[in-house]
């Protein structure tokens, strides 16, 4: 099986002027609309919402932009 890896960008602490810190991460496409992002040494599920995609980490939702999605 070949992994479909791409690049994503986590946007930490977004505010009215945009994200305060952007972090590049590896994103893996498993199937259909299921993606995993490698953050803090683990693969974390990407949740797809109507307005944004995000991961959950320590009780916070961190927005992620995935290239080509």
Image: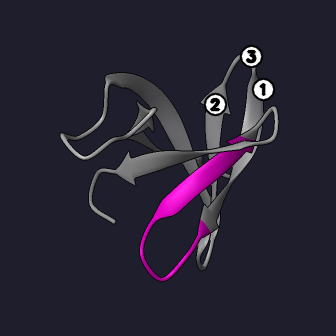
**How far apart are the two marked residues, 1 and 2, measured between alpha carbons?**
5 Å
Pick out the residue farthest to the front.
16
**Of helix, strand and loop, which one carries label 2?**
strand
Q: Is residue 58 magenta?
A: no
In the depicted structure, whether residue 25 falls above or below residue 50: above
**How far apart are the two marked residues, 3 and 1, measured between alpha carbons?**
4 Å
In the image, is 22 to the left or to the right of 45? Answer: left
Q: For the residues labelled 3 and 2, say whether their Cβ atoms are less than 8 Å apart.
A: yes
Residue topped by disc 2 = 38
Residue at the image point whose x is 37% and y is 52% from the top: 66
Can residue 4 be seen in this snapshot?
A: no
Q: Is residue 55 magenta?
A: yes
**Of helix, strand and loop, which one carries label 1?**
strand
Q: Residues within 10 Å of mark 2 (few under 14, many from 20)?
A: some
Residue at the image point whose x is 48% and y is 48% from the top: 63
Residue topped by disc 3 = 41
Residue 40 in which image quadrant: top right
In the image, is 23 to the left or to the right of 47? Answer: left
Question: Looking at the figure, which quarter contains the C terminus?
Answer: bottom left
Residue topped by disc 1 = 42
Q: For the residues labelled 3 and 1, say whether their Cβ atoms are less than 8 Å apart.
A: yes
Q: For the residues labelled 1 and 2, say whether their Cβ atoms are less than 8 Å apart.
A: yes
Q: Which residues are magenta?
A: 48-56
**Of helix, strand and loop, which one carries label 3?**
loop
């Amino acid at each position: 099986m070949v992994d479909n890896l791409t690049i994503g960008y986590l946007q930490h602490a977004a505010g009215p002027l945009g994200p305060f810190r952007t972090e590049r991460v590896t994103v893996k496409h498993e199937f259909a609309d299921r993606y995993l992002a490698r953050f803090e040494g683990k693969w974390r599920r990407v949740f797809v919402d109507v307005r944004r995609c995000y991961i959950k980490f320590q009780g916070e939702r961190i927005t992620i932009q995935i290239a080509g999605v």
